[in-house]
Image: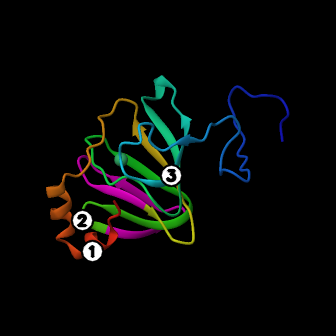
Amino acid sequence: MDLQESAYTRSFRPDDEAFGWDGVEVLAYKEDGSAPFRAVTRQVLFEEAEHGCQLRYFEVSPGGHTTLERHQHVHAVLILRGRGTVLVGSEVREIGEHDLCSVPPLTWHQFRAADDAPLGFLCLVSSERDRPQLPSDEDLAALRADPVLARAIRT
Ligand code: MN
């Protein structure tokens, strides 16, 4: 373990409160609290402007879920820890450590942790991105017309 502070590296150092990295703040998943979600934290790992993208780590606690949303920007997701279920478009899949998930433009998506395990994942996004859209009552009704989606969706 390097005692000198590095300009280029940050050590992985989970503690009792968070799976995390030195000097990386554990943030609320969404700042404004306007969208429905349960038990999710966010850590921004890389956000240098030159990258044109951000790499974030999200962690959903057991039984929790991210917001059901869609947007023009895309996500590239790598599950780092735990397991759960992902809804993307018309698919619902079990997902676990080291699995990958792509979220295409304007595609409904939601990540849910198992009841007895967290779901921690890296998510790559463009620095410039549109605001997520939430489903209207009509959207929700249309999604729930599919019994597989109806069982998976958390609001
Ligand atoms: Mn999203």
Mark 1 or mark 3, earlier in chain: 3
Mark 3 residue crowding within 10 angstroms, few (<14) / some (14–19) / many (20+):
many
Segment tinted magenta in the rendering: 92-111
Say whether residue 96 is visible: no
Q: Which residue is mark 1?
A: 148
Side of 55 relative to 14 (left or right): left
In this orientation, which residue lies closer to the viewer: 155 or 8?
155
- Residue 73 position, x and y percent, is 30, 40
**Residue at x-position 43% and y-position 63%:** 112
Mark 1 or mark 2, earlier in chain: 2
Q: Main secondary structure of the magenta part?
A: strand
Q: CA distance from mark 1 to mark 2?
A: 8 Å
Which one is in front in this view, the residue at disc 1 or the one at disc 3? 3
Q: CA distance from mark 2 to mark 3?
A: 23 Å
- Residue 71 position, x and y percent, is 27, 43
Looking at numbered disc 2 in the image, what kind of residue is underneath it? Answer: Ser
Q: Is residue 106 magenta?
A: yes
**Helix, strand or loop at disc 2?**
loop
**Residue at x-position 21% and y-position 60%:** 140
Asked if disc 3 is less than 8 Å from ligand 1, the answer is no
Residue 137, quarter of the rendered image: bottom left
Side of 151 relative to 141 (left or right): right
Give the residue at the far bottom of this rendering: 147
**Residue at x-position 69% and y-position 51%:** 17
Marks 1 & 2, CB-CB < 8 Å contact: yes
Looking at numbered disc 1 in the image, what kind of residue is underneath it? Answer: Val
Q: Which residue is mark 2?
A: 90
Asked if disc 1 is less than 8 Å from ligand 1, the answer is no
